Amino acid sequence: AGYTLWEETAARMVDAQAPGLAGRVRELGSIPGSGPGWPVRLLEECSLLHLLDTAWLGRERLPEPLAATVRTRVGLPVSAEGPPVRDHWLVLAQYDTADGRLTTRRIWLYGRESGRTALLLSFGAAGRTPELALPVGVTIDAELTPYPGGGLRADLGRRFATPVAVPGTPPPGGPAEAALAAYGEALRGDPWLDGWPVTLRDVIPVPSGGGW
């Protein structure tokens, strides 16, 4: 019965053309009883949802980059509209996630000349592989058009050459303190971020519980 309540609320968000809000509400339903500390996690997620609701109601008073981020998080369709950035883009990572209805492919790129990091998204219906695929380690000479807001998402535009597997300049990297500072700065533009790409230098990974 408890989960049904969340689903009913999410359905209302879908009817209101706010699929981003619907997704966050559905995630709330999976938190109760999910393990030690779940009440804290539920409170944190409810707080972020309330912040998004408040930001949406007051979007006219927000700076445009933050307002664009709010529209994206609510789930309104947006288009890549920034000035194209041509660079030699090194493919850092590619991975897929599936939610049963949709497979999302994330491809992370690093611009050798600009020093920018960019995220390409590609989608496939259930059981189908997303079309866009770029092998990790190759470099592509191409234009990327960024989306509005505080995120790193961009669209892949014109390609000027075939991707080549030549050594590209990796991100310079930094200590863990710099990574935390970069994440904190990114949260100013998008308080609903759940991750941010960083490159660490001069660190040694060690096992810790179920991870590193």
Image (tube, helix red, strand yellow):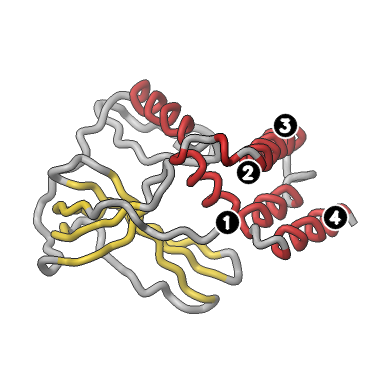
Three-letter residue code for mark 1: Gly
Measuring 37% from the left and 21% from the top, which residue is drawn there? 177
Name the residue tied to disc 1.
Answer: 75
Q: In this view, does 149 lie above or below 101?
A: above
- Extreme right residue here? 1
Spatial CA span between label 3 and label 4: 20 Å
Three-letter residue code for mark 2: Trp
Q: How crowded is mark 4: few (under 14 residues within 10 Å), some or many (20 or more)?
A: few
Name the residue tied to disc 3.
Answer: 40
The tag on residue 56 is 2
Three-letter residue code for mark 3: Val
Name the residue tied to disc 4.
Answer: 5
Measuring 31% from the left and 68% from the top, which residue is drawn there? 133
Q: Residues within 10 Å of mark 2 (few under 14, many from 20)?
A: some
Q: Does the CB distance between marks 4 and 1 fall below 8 Å?
A: no
Residue 165, image x and y in percent? 12, 61
Which mark is first along the chain, 2 or 3? 3
Q: Is mark 4 on a helix, strand or loop?
A: helix
Residue 146, image x and y in percent? 33, 52
Residue 208 falls left or right of residue 39:
left
Which mark is first along the chain, 1 or 3? 3
